[in-house]
Image (cartoon, rainbow, N blue to C red):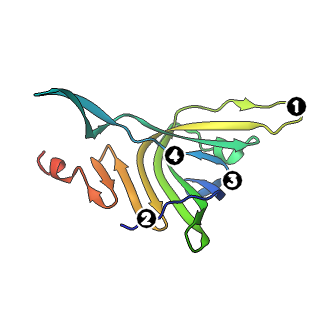
């Protein structure tokens, strides 16, 4: 897949919970995907190899200014659809344009957020979610699809778990 590097500033963002717009221009932290590792003894020493079918827990955070009722009403302890849209400036050798990044996640809220309110400043909320599945698209192309429950680990269209799940 031909994916361009996204080098410019974030121009806008939006967050949808269960299909309803819940925040605009929020700070979005998408999950880090970290496979477990196993140590293997080789002839010359020990090496550490990633196990892509066993992942560490993933989490995502959304930080919004003000007390956000749209997000607060969705903090029920059940599965939710979280969609994060990011518009980022892409600077190339010949042009500059806006490109679209979309993250689709299945999440469960991990916390009811504290609300930080200081006189004369905007209040802030940070909501942390446990991520059950994660799909990331850049410029309309799916570049990452991770779903530990269903045994899916796809990067740039290649399914790294397909052969393993076929054997079980």
Q: Which residue is mark 3?
A: 25
Residues marked 4 and 3 touching at CB (< 8 Å): no
Q: Regarding mark 1 in the picture, which secondary structure is present there?
A: loop
At 55% from the left and 70% from the top, the residue drawn is 93
Q: Which residue is mark 1?
A: 119
Q: CA distance from mark 1 to mark 3?
A: 22 Å
Examine the image and state in which quarter residue 148 appears.
Answer: top left
In front of the other: label 2 or label 4?
2
Q: Position of residue 121 (x, y in %)?
A: 84, 37
Q: What's the residue at 31%, 61% (across, down)?
A: 157
Task: Please tell me in which quadrant of the rendered image residue 68 appears.
Answer: top right
Would you say 42 lies left or right of 77 here? left
Going from N to C along the chain, the mark reached first, 1 or 3, is 3
Residue underneath mark 2: 3
Residue projecting furthest to the bottom: 94
Question: Which label sits in the foreground, 1 or 2?
Answer: 2
Earlier-in-chain disc, 1 versus 4 = 4
159 on left or right of 1: left
Badge 3 density bin: few <14, some 14–19, many ≥20, Cα 10 Å: some
Q: CA distance from mark 2 to mark 4?
A: 19 Å
Give the residue pinned by disc 4: 30
Mark 2 nearby-residue class (10 Å; few <14, some 14–19, many ≥20): few
> Where is residue 10 drawn, in percent x and y?
64, 56
Position of 167 with respect to 77 (left or right) is: left
Q: Position of residue 21 (x, y in %)?
A: 64, 57
């Amino acid at each position: 897949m031909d994916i361009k590097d996204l080098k410019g500033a974030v121009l806008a963002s939006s967050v949808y919970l269960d299909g309803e717009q819940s925040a605009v221009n929020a700070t979005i932290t998408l999950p880090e995907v970290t496979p477990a590792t196993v140590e293997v003894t080789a002839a010359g020493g020990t090496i550490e190899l990633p196990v892509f079918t066993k992942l560490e827990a993933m989490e995502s955070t959304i930080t919004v200014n003000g007390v956000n009722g749209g997000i607060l009403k969705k903090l029920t302890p059940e599965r939710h659809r979280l969609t994060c849209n990011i518009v980022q400036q892409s600077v190339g050798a010949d042009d500059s344009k806006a490109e679209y990044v979309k993250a689709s996640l299945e999440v469960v809220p991990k916390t009811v957020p504290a609300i930080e309110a200081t006189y004369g400043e905007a209040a802030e909320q940070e909501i942390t979610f446990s991520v059950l599945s994660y799909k990331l698209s850049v410029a309309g192309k799916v570049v990452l699809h991770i779903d530990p429950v269903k045994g899916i680990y796809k990067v740039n269209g290649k399914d790294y778990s397909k052969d393993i799940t076929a054997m079980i």
